[in-house]
Image: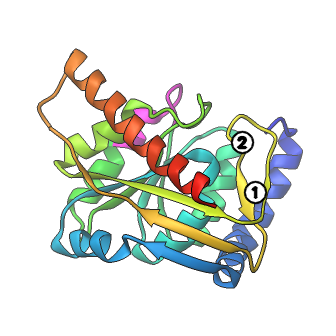
């Protein structure tokens, strides 16, 4: 974000108190069409492990919709992560703090242990985070689905009117009362035995499917 530490701290404090409520208020105001929800919910209630695949810049509506299911998520330990963690915890997400450079393995293993104990096993990954490239999936999303022997669920969202940040992810905050669409795509069943080159190819294929899902929704508006 390019913010000073003091500014990040102040925003984090605000987000901890009001962030979840703000997301809910904006979400409830939207003229929102939701596609694929019943299929997703059916799998969840069956106990199938589901890894929700978000793109970093298009998560806002996804947070709002999935919060009642209390998904698990890994959030960076950097200052920006303090803000995201505060918002997600305000939405009843279960967060684990870590990143590729600090605490990531501990956070990942902690989340896996937590999910295996749950009747409904839902996690959420910003697949292109924390630094991009935009809409290119990193391995973590696929690995989580492998370790849980579950599915990746592509989630795409778009709103007619939104404020977009200037950063690499172009993070979008929908303008209240906008028309919006959220689409839960065809679940992708992963192969838990893939490794090496075969896994790389599977991740790339999943990435392209998820990107197409979002791009098609963008182009429909």
Is any part of residue 47 visible from this angle?
A: yes
Residue with the mark numbered 2: 79
Q: Quadrant of residue 27?
A: bottom right
Is residue 106 a member of the stretch shown in magenta? Answer: yes
> Which residue sits at x=77%, y=76%?
176
List x then y, in percent, for residue 165.
79, 47
Q: Which residues are magenta?
A: 99-108
Label 2 neighbourhood size at 10 Å, few (<14), some (14-19), many (20+)?
A: some
Look at the numbered discs 2 and 1 and tell me whether their residues touch, using CB distance below 8 Å.
Answer: yes
User: Would you place residue 150 above or below residue 136 in this image?
Assistant: below
User: Would you place residue 61 above or below residue 202 in this image?
Assistant: below
Instruction: Report the front residue among 66 and 213.
Output: 213
Q: Residue furthest left?
A: 193
List x then y, in percent, for residue 144.
30, 43
Label 1 neighbourhood size at 10 Å, few (<14), some (14-19), many (20+)?
A: many
List x then y, in percent, for residue 83.
70, 54
> Which image quarter holds the C terminus?
bottom right
Is any part of residue 119 visible from this angle?
A: no
What separation in Å lies between label 2 and label 1 (alpha carbons)? 9 Å
């Amino acid at each position: 974000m390019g913010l000073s530490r003091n500014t990040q701290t102040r925003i984090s404090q605000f987000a901890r108190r009001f962030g979840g409520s703000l997301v809910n208020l904006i979400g409830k105001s939207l003229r929102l069409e939701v596609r694929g929800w019943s299929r997703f919910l059916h799998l969840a209630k069956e106990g199938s492990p589901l890894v929700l695949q978000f793109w970093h810049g298009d998560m806002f509506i996804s947070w709002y919709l999935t919060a009642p299911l209390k998904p698990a998520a890994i959030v960076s330990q950097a200052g920006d992560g303090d803000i995201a963690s505060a918002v997600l915890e305000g939405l009843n997400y279960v967060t684990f703090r870590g990143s590729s450079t600090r605490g990531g393995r501990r956070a990942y293993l902690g989340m896996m242990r937590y999910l295996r104990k749950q009747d409904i096993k839902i996690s959420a990954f910003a697949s292109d985070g924390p630094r991009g490239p935009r809409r290119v999936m990193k391995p973590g999303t696929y690995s989580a689905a492998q370790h849980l022997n579950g599915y990746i669920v592509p989630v795409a969202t778009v709103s007619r009117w939104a404020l977009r940040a200037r950063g690499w992810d172009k993070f979008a905050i929908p303008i209240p009362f906008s028309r919006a669409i959220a689409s839960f795509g065809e679940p992708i069943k992963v192969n838990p035995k893939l490794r090496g080159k075969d896994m790389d190819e599977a991740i790339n294929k999943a990435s392209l499917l998820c990107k197409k899902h979002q791009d098609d929704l963008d182009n429909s508006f």
